[in-house]
Amino acid sequence: MPKRFDRTWIRIAIYYAIALGISYLARVQWGTSDPADAGPGHWGLFRHLLSGFGPFVGALLVWAVFRPERRMSFGGTFPIMGVAMLAVPAFVLGIAGVPNIFGLDAHLFGIEIGLWIALYAVLEETGWRGYLQDELYGRPALLRYAIVGVFWYFWHFTYLLGDNSLGTEAVNLGFLVLASIGIGFVADRTRSIFAAAAFHVVGNVLMTSTEFRTFIPTSSARLTIVLVCVAVWLIMLRLWAMRDKRIRAAAPAA
């Protein structure tokens, strides 16, 4: 048991060092979280994906080198539904339209930023739920979710950016722990990085994404987008659970 414990935390340490290092470079050194920096044209948005590459690269490296037991996958137990869940933000934003400073059609830009935020969420969730939460499997669920939430908070480096008060940082920590509980619940039941990424989008749209606060500055508009997406996702999760139940019922007894 001690040896297994040591190997687990060695893998986690390597993963987190990579995630933190890339996040620090992107957020603190390169300023990818600065809403004033849209880069060269609308494609500059994709420069902001750099901060999400840390968890993604860290997870891929640990999986490739150490080959830990994995329960999570990108599609989970229902890959088509996982992909469909990721497409919901682009569909909703494409219908609503997102005005922009780039001279692009609002509906096309809505689709683009919807796909952008989904891709960003996949990069992060590959590490947080796809690797880290899975690595902690066997521990109580709420403990796993909370641990991931704390790691997730320090990875954002908000305490180094700007002049946030202690109270603001406490709120940030609490929000990310609560978000981790919700996303972790979805991840455990679907075993899908894509499904976890879909619900990750909620926090990005409401609070943490400087891009969404820039292009959709009205909080009520962002809330409406989130509520529509969540309503569709909950229906999808229900269909997902019903399908998994039918498959288990049809499986021959061991």
Image: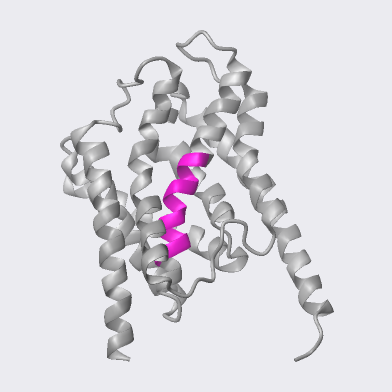
Colouring of the image: one colour
Asked if residue 154 is positioned above or below residue 181 in the image, the reply reads above
Name the residue nearer the viewer: 117 or 123: 123
189 with respect to 243 (left or right): left
Foreground residue among 15 and 185: 15
Q: Position of residue 61 (x, y in %)?
A: 37, 59
In the rendering, at what x and y percent does residue 14 appear?
27, 63
**136 displayed left or right of 27:** right
Tell me what residue is drawn at x 28 percent, y 89 percent: 2
Judged from this view, the residue extending furthest toward the top is 103
The quadrant in which residue 229 appears is top right
Magenta includes 69? no
Q: Main secondary structure of the magenta part?
A: helix
Quarter that holds the C terminus:
bottom right
Give the residues in magenta.
119-132
Point out the residue furthest to the right here: 250
Q: Left of 86 or right of it: where is 152?
A: left
Q: Position of residue 148 (x, y in %)?
A: 36, 63
Where is residue 94? Give x, y as percent: 64, 25
Residue in view at x 43 percent, y 63 percent: 131
Q: Is residue 236 above or below residue 72?
A: above
